[in-house]
């Protein structure tokens, strides 16, 4: 009985102390969700530090200016509290050279990248294992290789309302505007095994302007599934012919919805479907896309024998016609 009374007295005393502290505004710290905070940065070192210390729900606000460095975002947000990096088009990230490094490399999940620019880097924005990230209203220009690359099983990514212009300026064959997944020859390097596809699935690419890309405007690799490519505008995309770069969009993945895209100017076809690996390049649907001119080949050239590709009937302006398969 004495032990019980002593135990009760101890907890009662603790409760009274906690009550007293609360009365004067002093409370014990308990685990809680991160409150949304904004960190404003104006220098490269401040940005590097902010990225390194980012927490869920935080906003990193870029003041106008040029940020030169190798910027890496390793922290993860959450579904309800993403980490946001935001700035105007006058806030520009660069490595200072088109021959090395990435303008922004995101390896954390649940990020929102909004409004700012990336230029003069080997690659623009690269997402590795970065699920649920949104790229919105950014500008990626004057890039040595590809503009935006979604890879290493980065799933449920959205790229929207953005500008990609002038890619492939150091290596034309690697100058894709937006690149989804990894080619089979890179699976070992990216995924650790040549038998492990890069499952960057459910990528939505919408309302972007993609121009002057030496390689494809959008390249969708084998191993990826279930994305949507809609309402994008292409100008002079896929114009170099290097590494067979000769179209706006080259689809090697499965079950993509490719709707309401438009544009003018490319080396051969507007859209192509290939199957470099058996079982891929199938189940893709092309609906209500439009060519305004400058397409000497087909609107949709299906070179894949994988079943399920559908081209819906419509008027066309590609020189050789709508498609090499029967439209529906």
Image (cartoon, rainbow, N blue to C red):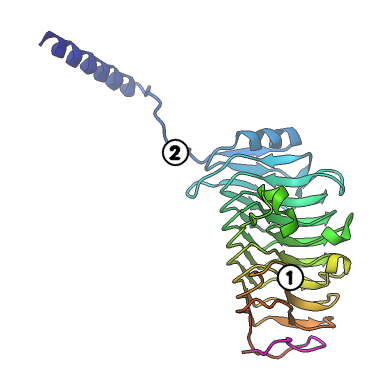
Residue 56, disc: none
x, y percentage for residue 52?
Answer: 64, 34
Residue at horizontal 67%, vertical 90%?
A: 326
Sequence-wise, the earlier of marks 1 and 2 is 2
Point 31% across, 23% down: residue: 23
Residues packed near mark 2 inside 10 Å, few (<14), some (14 to 19) or many (20 plus): few
Which residue is disc 2 drawn over?
Answer: 33
Q: Is residue 120 above or below residue 36?
A: below
- Judged from this view, the residue extending furthest toward the top is 2
Q: Mark 1 points at which residue?
A: 250
- Kindly indicate the quadrant of the structure image that contains residue 54: top right
Asked if residue 263 can be seen in this view, the reply is no
Q: Does the magenta stretch include residue 325?
A: yes
Q: Is 35 left or right of 270, judged from the image as shown?
A: left
Q: Is mark 2 on a helix, strand or loop?
A: loop
Q: What stretch is highlighted in magenta?
A: 317-327
Q: Where is residue 2 in the image (x, y as percent from the top left)?
A: 12, 8
Name the mark nearer the viewer: 1 or 2.
Answer: 1
Quadrant the C terminus occupies:
bottom right
């Amino acid at each position: 009985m004495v032990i019980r009374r002593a135990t009760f007295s101890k907890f009662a005393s603790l409760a009274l102390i906690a009550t007293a502290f609360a009365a004067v505004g002093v409370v014990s710290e308990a685990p809680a969700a991160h409150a949304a905070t904004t960190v404003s940065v104006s220098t490269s070192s401040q940005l590097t530090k902010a990225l390194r210390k980012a927490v869920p729900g935080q906003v990193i606000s870029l003041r106008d200016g040029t940020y030169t460095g190798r910027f890496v975002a390793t922290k993860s947000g959450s579904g309800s509290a993403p980490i946001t990096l935001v700035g105007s088009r006058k806030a520009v990230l660069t490595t200072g050279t088109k021959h090395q490094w990435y303008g922004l490399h995101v390896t954390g999940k649940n990020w929102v990248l909004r409004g700012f620019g990336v230029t003069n880097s080997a690659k623009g924005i690269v997402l590795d294992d970065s699920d649920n990230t949104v790229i919105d209203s950014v500008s990626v220009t004057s890039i040595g290789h590809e503009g935006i690359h979604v890879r290493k099983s980065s799933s449920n990514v959205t790229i929207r309302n953005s500008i990609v212009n002038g890619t492939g300026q150091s290596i034309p064959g690697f100058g894709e505007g937006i690149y989804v997944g990894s080619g089979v020859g890179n699976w070992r390097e990216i995924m650790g095994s040549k038998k492990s596809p890069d499952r960057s699935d459910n990528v939505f690419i919408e309302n972007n302007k993609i121009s002057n890309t030496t390689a494809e405007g959008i390249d969708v690799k084998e191993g990826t599934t279930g994305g949507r490519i809609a309402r994008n505008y292409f100008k002079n995309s896929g114009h170099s012919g290097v590494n067979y770069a000769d179209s706006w969009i080259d689809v090697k993945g499965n079950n993509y919805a490719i709707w309401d895209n438009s544009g003018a100017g490319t080396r051969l076809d507007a859209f192509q479907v290939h199957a470099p690996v058996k079982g891929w390049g199938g189940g893709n649907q092309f609906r209500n896309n439009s060519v305004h001119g400058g397409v000497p080949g087909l609107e949709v050239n299906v070179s894949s024998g994988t079943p399920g590709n559908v081209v819906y009937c419509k008027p066309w302006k590609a020189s050789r016609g709508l498609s090499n398969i029967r439209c529906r």
